[in-house]
Image (cartoon, grey):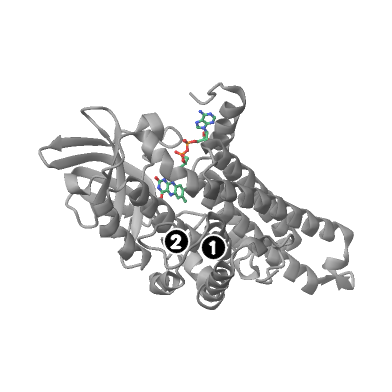
Amino acid sequence: APTGLDADFYHFQDLLTPVEQEAALRIRDFMEREVRPIADDYWERAEFPHHLIPGIAATGVIGTMWPESRTFENSALFRGWAAVEIARVDASFATFVGVTSGLAMGAIGVGGSDAQRAQWLPAMGRGEVIGAFGLTEPLAGSDTARGLRTTATRRGDTWILDGAKRWIGNATFADITLIWAKDIDDGQVKGFVVRKDTPGFTPAKIERKQSLRGVQNADITLEGVEVPETDRLQRIDSFKDLAGVLGPTRIGVAWEAMGIAVGAYEAAVRYAKEREQFGRPIASYQLVQQKLAESLADVTAGLAVCVRVSQMDDAGTRRDEHAAMAKAFCTARMRETVARCREVLGGNGIQLDHGVARFFADAEAVYSYEGTYDMNTLIVGRAITGHQAFV
Ligand code: FAD
């Protein structure tokens, strides 16, 4: 394989263009040099390494999707590989990038007017403006399509937002948070760019999280938050428009899940070759080899799904259920893989220093965010049967 990733067993990276392969290597180099040495410590302290934002932005990985912010031509396939390269080192960092680049920039890219796109996307791509995406609420998780309580009330050229959001990644420090709220006049969901320090907008860090500890999530209260009409996303008129943002990001999470599986697999292979029991490396025993071979097969199957669904994305033939299947399938394979790899390390598998425990814990959040396994499975079930089972 051009980039020498052993876990890329079927050489999927050969499908990238030379420019994309070079960019993938740039990202890998940054992650290995800057992030790997500190990832465990930041995770343990539940802190985010803010000083690395300019460096990751310099790799060109933020805002790769949009003409206003991308620094080179690239495919959905490349954007997926970029998520693998980041997540195989640190899933918290991958989540930070996914939120500002995929969700927040995606919302502006899909829903913003030309002027709004020009206003935000270039600066966000350079990492100078960080974004968050506030959809989930304390009382609306899987059912945000119908259950949002946060309201938007229009008074002339100003909107007033009231309500609460939960689990919002990056929102403790983001410069802008995309807030989704129901217009009390027409009952439709609208999107608003809310700037940090707007009176009435109060994010509070969610403490004691045991997964993705290196990235911060916020509970947000919105009390009479005033947003000018010019900061309402002009091309979002309903939840259906918002759903257009979530297709690509769900695929991004499927790739991210494979990155997490690759990270755990690589650590397990390394450990199995070094650790000796009964006078021989544990890698020489059949049951250990079986765990490694099954893990590599899961990674390969998941990557194959990701590659194909991203190709369909590029071709414009990808539907919501295709993204949902990729997210559900890949996060399930990830969960099995990190558990198997954890087992290969025995007791050391539950300790941060040996390279698997962090992935094992992080997999749980990735399994549930961007639509739980159940919800994504039911979206596929609806496509198969024509019956919607979740309402
Ligand atoms: P619930 O919806 O309460 O679900 C609980 C359980 O019930 C799940 O197993 C679910 O599958 C099941 N269930 C629910 N309804 C049905 C049904 N009809 N049929 C069968 N089973 C059902 N949100 C944002 O807006 N922005 C973010 O940046 C963000 N980041 C996040 C980061 C982390 C670390 C986490 C944990 C979450 C984040 N989220 C974010 C929220 C995330 O998208 C939600 O957690 C997710 O959609 C599930 O909602 P919930 O947690 O409220 O679970």
Question: Residue 310's x, y, as percent?
Answer: 57, 50
Q: From the viewer's perspective, is the residue at label 1 or at label 2 nearer?
A: 2
Helix, strand or loop at label 1? It is: helix
On the rendered image, what quadrant is the N terminus found in?
bottom right
Percent x, y of residue 21: 59, 69
- Pick whichever, 96 or 186, lies toward us: 186
- Residue in view at x 45 percent, y 70 percent: 56
Q: Position of residue 252 (x, y in %)?
A: 52, 52
Residue of label 1: 82
Q: CA distance from mark 1 to mark 2?
A: 10 Å
Q: Residues within 10 Å of mark 1 (few under 14, many from 20)?
A: many
Question: Which quadrant of the view contains residue 234?
Answer: top left
Q: Is residue 236 visible?
A: yes
Find residue 271 and report its image quarter: bottom right
Q: Residue at x 83, y 60 (%)?
A: 289
> Label 2, on which residue?
64
Residue found at x 51% / y 44%: 316
Amino acid type of the residue tagged 2 in the rendering: Thr
- Estimate how packed mark 2 is, as few (under 14), some (14 to 19) or many (20 or more) residues with alpha carbons within 10 Å: many
Q: Specify which label sits upstream in the sequence, 1 or 2.
A: 2
